[in-house]
Amino acid sequence: MRKVAIIGAGQQGRSIAEALALQGEYGVSITDKDSAVLNKFSGLVNHENIKVFETSAQTVRDADIIILATPIDKFSSVLHEIAGHVKPGAIVTDVGSGKQKSIYEISQNLPDGAVYIPSHPIAGKAGVGPETGSADMYRNQSVVVIPQGPAKAEEQVVVQKMWGDMDARITPMSALAHDKLYGTISHFQHVIAFSQTLAGEDEKNSGSAEEDYQKAYNTLLDTTRIANASAPMWQAIFKDNKASIQEASNGFKARLEELKAALESETSDKLLGLIGQAHNFRQGIPEDRPREAIWSEFQDFSAEKKQTVMFRGKVCSTRLMRPARYRWQNGLQPPH
Amino acid sequence: MISAALTLNGMDIAKQLGRNVSLAENANPSFKDGSAAMLSHPEYLTDLLYYNRKHILENIKRFEGRLDHVMDAIRDDNTAEITSIIEQASEIRRSMPAHKGADEMRRDRVVNPETLSELPEYMQRAL
């Protein structure tokens, strides 16, 4: 049985511990600096393959794999605590969101004899703490494992297998590409969600017609879902990946200016071109599982692509909805 | 408009990163949610935006003010301000309905079987 030590019993720590313990091939030891978090974990998770310890040093003893599931700014202190207690050849990995920063922090403080393989699970739920974790957190989710070259090939396979055993999909990617990609589609996405939530509230308070607010409400619910977030966690992520977030903001603002100019032009052709590009690109991104049919798909009389969607709890094809488009083409009023 | 800019920005990044990093395979649920509005039919969406442009441009201005404020706080490592922004936004968002996750959220966007009778007749027949 492979021994895995987890430092940090919050959402990610609990999810990893449960997923590995249930898998059956891993013996898990776990700790958290915060005794309240650790007590909460112990109250929530009870499995014969999981042992809870009070210190990091006790937790990592005999571990084959050590997972740092704390904020990145805690990495160096954790590594200093466990130095001298780590088994030779032990693999250290982490779940940090800013990969360049994680690699810098861990490489500087890695205990002698340990090998570092950086990883980042692209999975999470609103809120923090062990109560928000679950054994199925990584199922069908992507986990980025940063390639470390042939010298660490064996250790890399061990880390990939561990995530694979939690039913995750492994995505190899450089740290730079990771930070750029997730700086844009996750970290900056949160900046947008916070800004949009506050701007929505400004609009509501400015005396805008309730009707106008309601029109945009469904979209607002989608784009701001992630605004219900942990302030300490996101404040740390913004700091750890600041450069990529700034770059994403510049790119976003340039695109928004382009869209605004198109919106102000004399015809809607340019706007249609941009929206069409965005539409085509978004259609190429599959859903994790069949999603519920969206209103506007009834209006999409030009789409030839068959999509699998859910309706009334059943999986069906958008092809079944096509009669609607013929009705529309025959001069019936489109809905609004 | 925000969803369109996000999607196009995501497209630009995917192009920059090349074929080795596919957004189709690596997109996270928050990006999928943020760009979900772009699944609507382009002509329908364009008309909706173009004929409401005055109101939309006013709102974008408001949004840009908030965005600049957040980005300034991030640039300056202003921890207290970032914390205050996130806490405010979280509180507002918690007061809104239906936030059980991406799939649950999508369910809110769809035709609700209980209100099926409110759909135009031809849509009901299509279903």
Image: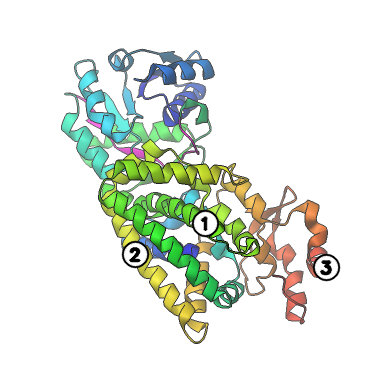
Task: Inspect the image, locate mark 3, and give the three-letter code of the amino acid beneath it.
Answer: Glu
Bounds of the magenta segment: A113-128
Say which element carries label 2.
Answer: helix
Q: Is residue A20 rendered to the left or right of residue A308?
A: left
Are discs 2 and 1 located on one and the same chain?
Answer: yes
**Amino acid residing under circle 1:** Gly
Q: Are marks 3 and 2 in contact (CB under 8 Å)?
A: no
Q: Principal SS element in the magenta part?
A: loop
The residue tagged 1 is A200
Q: Residue at x 74, y 53 (%)?
A: B112
Q: Quadrant of the N terminus of chain A?
A: top left
Q: CA distance from mark 3 to mark 2?
A: 43 Å
Instruction: Please name the residue shown 37% across and 25% down the image.
Output: A8
Whether A132 is drawn above or below B30: the answer is above
Which of B104/A68 is in front? Answer: B104
Colouring: rainbow
Which tag is nearer the camera, tag 1 or tag 3? 1
Give the crowd class for mark 1: few <14, some 14-19, many >=20 residues within 10 Å: many
Say which chain tag 3 marks: B
**Foreground pick, A248 / A36:** A36
Badge 1 sits on which subunit? A
Q: Which residue is mark 3?
A: B121
Specify whether A218 is left or right of A153.
right
Give above or below for B123 relative to B95: below
Q: Is residue A217 visible?
A: yes
Give the residue furthest to the bottom.
Answer: A266
> Can the viewer see residue A280?
no
Subunit ID for the residue under disc 2: A
Which corner quadrant of the image does residue A55 belong to? top left
Amino acid type shown at disc 2: Gly
Q: Position of residue A155 (x, y in %)?
A: 29, 32
Q: How many marks?
A: 3
